[in-house]
Image (spheres, rainbow, N blue to C red):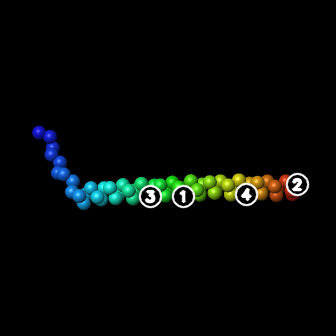
Amino acid sequence: MGIKLKPRSIQTNLFMIYSIMIVVVTLFLVTSFYTYESTTVRKRTFESFQDLSQSLSNTV
């Protein structure tokens, strides 16, 4: 007496598979880009602070 589900068509299966693949690839690219950029920004920020503190110590 359970609910019988209609079997999925090949189109539905392919759509689900390709959608999942696109989401996974997009997440990988976004994560890689974020990691690279955050590292670069941290490095630049640290260098900027070092330059600023060097400049301040030279003026004193």
The disc placed on residue 48 is: 4
Q: Nearer the viewer, mark 4 or mark 2?
A: 4
Mark 3 or mark 4: which comes first in sequence?
Answer: 3
Distance between mark 1 and mark 2 Cα atoms: 41 Å
- Expressed as whole percent of the image width and height from the top left, the position of residue 21 reads 38, 56
Q: Nearer the viewer, mark 1 or mark 2?
A: 1
**Residue type pointed to by label 3:** Thr
Badge 1: residue crowd in 10 Å (few <14, some 14–19, many ≥20) = few
Q: Residue at x 36, y 55 (%)?
A: 20
Residue bearing mark 3: 26
Badge 4: residue crowd in 10 Å (few <14, some 14–19, many ≥20) = few
Mark 3 or mark 1: which comes first in sequence?
Answer: 3
Contact check, label 4 and label 2, Cβ < 8 Å: no
Q: Nearer the viewer, mark 4 or mark 1?
A: 1
Q: Nearer the viewer, residue 55 or 1?
A: 1
Distance between mark 4 and mark 2 Cα atoms: 19 Å
Mark 1 or mark 2: which comes first in sequence?
Answer: 1
Badge 3: residue crowd in 10 Å (few <14, some 14–19, many ≥20) = few
The disc placed on residue 14 is: none
Residue bearing mark 2: 60
Mark 3 or mark 2: which comes first in sequence?
Answer: 3
In the picture provided, is 54 more to the left or to the right than 17? right
Q: Residue furthest top?
A: 1
